[in-house]
Amino acid sequence: MNRTIQIAPVRRSIVVEASPQRAFEVFTDQVDAWWPKTHGIGATPIVRSVIEPFVGGRWYTTHTDGKDVTIGHVRAWEPGARFVVSWEIGADWKPDAREAFASEVEVLFKVDGAGKTRIDLEHRNFERMGAEPGEKMRTGVDGGWPGILNLYATYLASGAKS
């Protein structure tokens, strides 16, 4: 009998004082300004982070050795509403471009009262990696996404570039 494993997605939310369009733009266009330079999977420190603004675009980091390291690819791009990217990182925190093993991150931007946006992030499909590596990755990102979202919210609140 074949059994399909299911690993629960990681879900995190945060409310920011910005329109959904502005929140989306800062999250994606300004990722280099708020994503921590210490959170990279390259062999050397991060110089910059980029999310290319189109389906098929890369989410990547450039490092001090001049190399680009792909984190994932844009699967959905709806400015002001949502985007989805693959997470092409193995449980060993090394790049893994095998599409069949990639998990996925979806970020939604919704109005939450006057001048506020609720951002819902879901990191899912860990089971693609297999039971043990999938659980390991889930545990890692479950502990990481709250801090990442707080860095984003702090940057946005501090007067992110217009």
Image (cartoon, rainbow, N blue to C red):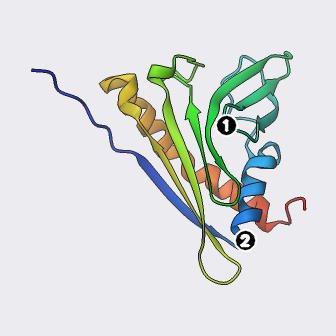
Residue annotated with mark 2: 19
Q: Quadrant of the N terminus?
A: top left
Tell me which residue sits at (51%, 21%) in the image. 99
- Report crowding for label 2: few under 14, some 14 to 19, many 20 or more residues within 10 A (C-alpha): many
- Towards the viewer: 25 or 157: 25
> Residue at 15% across / 21% down in the picture?
2
Residue 32 position (above or below residue 109): above
Relative to 35, is 40 above or below?
A: above
- The label shown at residue 139 is none
Query: How many labels, in total?
Result: 2
Q: Is residue 55 visible to us here?
A: yes
Please give the label number shown on residue 55.
1
Secondary element under disc 1, as helix, strand or loop, is loop
Answer left or right for 66 relative to 97. Answer: right
Is 142 in front, or is 54?
A: 54
Is residue 91 visible to us here? no
**Which residue: 67% across, 35% down?**
39
Q: Position of residue 29 (x, y in %)?
A: 80, 48
